[in-house]
Image (cartoon, helix red, strand yellow):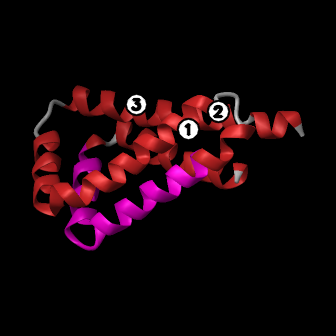
Amino acid sequence: MAIALAIFSLVILLPSAYAIVRPSILAAFARGFMEGPGLWVAVIVRLVLALLLWFSAPLSYTPVTFQALAIVAIAAAVALPLMGTARILKVIDWVASWRVAAIRSWCLLGVGFGAFLLWSISRAWVAA
């Protein structure tokens, strides 16, 4: 589980870091992703993240935080279909209209989240 979560963390961290450098790519990618079967892929990704967080929690430096994030990921997975693709596309368009600095700031949160997950799950290797 720890290795899978570490890989998942890199999948969050690296694209977020790239989007800091090229923020215009972010909206184009998100729009293209959501126009297809992306809504259901996004739901599955959030459910997988929730499972990885929940079952990796005992191995991490921050088990309670991992469990809380797992619950948030499940709530997000449930909320996406309720919002629907049309509303999500409107949110993507709204975010695309932001200033570049604001988009980069949000991408920094993705980098921070991915780095936090990597740091916290690193306990699994330090303890081994």
- Nearer to the camera, 101 or 94: 94
Q: Distance between the residues labelled 1 and 3?
A: 19 Å
Residue at numbered disc 1: 67
Span of residues in magenta: 24-53
Amino acid type indicated by mark 2: Pro
Query: Which element is circle 3 on?
Result: helix
Q: Residue 119 carries which label?
A: none
Q: Which mark is residue 63?
A: 2
Q: Is residue 8 left or right of residue 39?
A: right
Q: Which residue occupies the extreme right position in the image?
A: 128
- Nearer to the camera, 9 or 59: 59
Q: Quadrant of residue 94?
A: top left
* Mark 1 crowd level (few <14, some 14–19, many ≥20, 10 Å Cα): many
Q: In which quarter of the image is the C terminus?
A: top right
Q: Position of residue 41 (x, y in %)?
A: 37, 67
* Residue plotted at (16% across, 30% down): 99
Query: Which element is circle 1 on?
Result: helix
Q: Main secondary structure of the magenta part?
A: helix
Q: Quadrant of the N terminus?
A: bottom right
